[in-house]
Image (cartoon, helix red, strand yellow):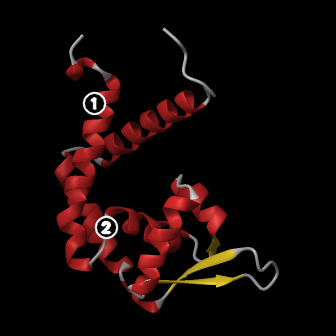
Amino acid sequence: MQISDMLCFSLYSASHAMTHLYRPLLAPLGLTYPQYLVLVALWAEDGQNLRQLGATLELESNTLTPLLKRMEEAGLITRTRSREDERMVLVSLTEKGRALQADSERITRCVLEASGLSIPEVIELRRKITALKQALSSFAEPVAG
């Protein structure tokens, strides 16, 4: 078997190509790809707590916290303690973070164009990748071969 025949390598290299594509699109906004994903999640539902946001992005808090700290320093988000439960940290967009949403449509169009796929093809590909992820995630431990 060659590496190019491996599904895992195809997914890995496609993911790498996707993040590489986003880099020049996000650079003028001063964003990294993970920061962009945080903004997309907050544009969909602002004011998420740290646990919700981590679940949405599938990131552990030790990865998410430094990322959010940099975004707060850049004026994109705020982190505040919940009044109901001070142990809970709420993450909210600032006006500056909200304003970047207008650029997301342009970025989405560029990515769709670069993919060479139609919208129905993208939807079907995403459905298949999501189904694969769910199937693989259902195994608590890797199956020995």
Check the image and report above or below for 110 versus 39.
above
Per the image, label 2 sits on a secondary structure element best described as: loop
Quadrant location of residue 19? bottom left
Per the image, label 1 sits on a secondary structure element best described as: helix
Instruction: Give me the disc on residue 108.
Output: none
Q: Are marks 1 and 2 in contact (CB under 8 Å)?
A: no
Q: Position of residue 106 (x, y in %)?
A: 25, 70
Q: Amino acid at mark 1?
A: Ser
Residue receiving disc 2: 32
- Residue at 37% over, 37% down: 125
Q: Earlier in the sequence, mark 1 or mark 2?
A: 1
Q: Amino acid at mark 2?
A: Thr
Q: Position of residue 97 (x, y in %)?
A: 42, 83
Residue receiving disc 1: 10
- Residue at 42% over, 85% down: 73
Check the image and report above or below for 87 versus 11.
below
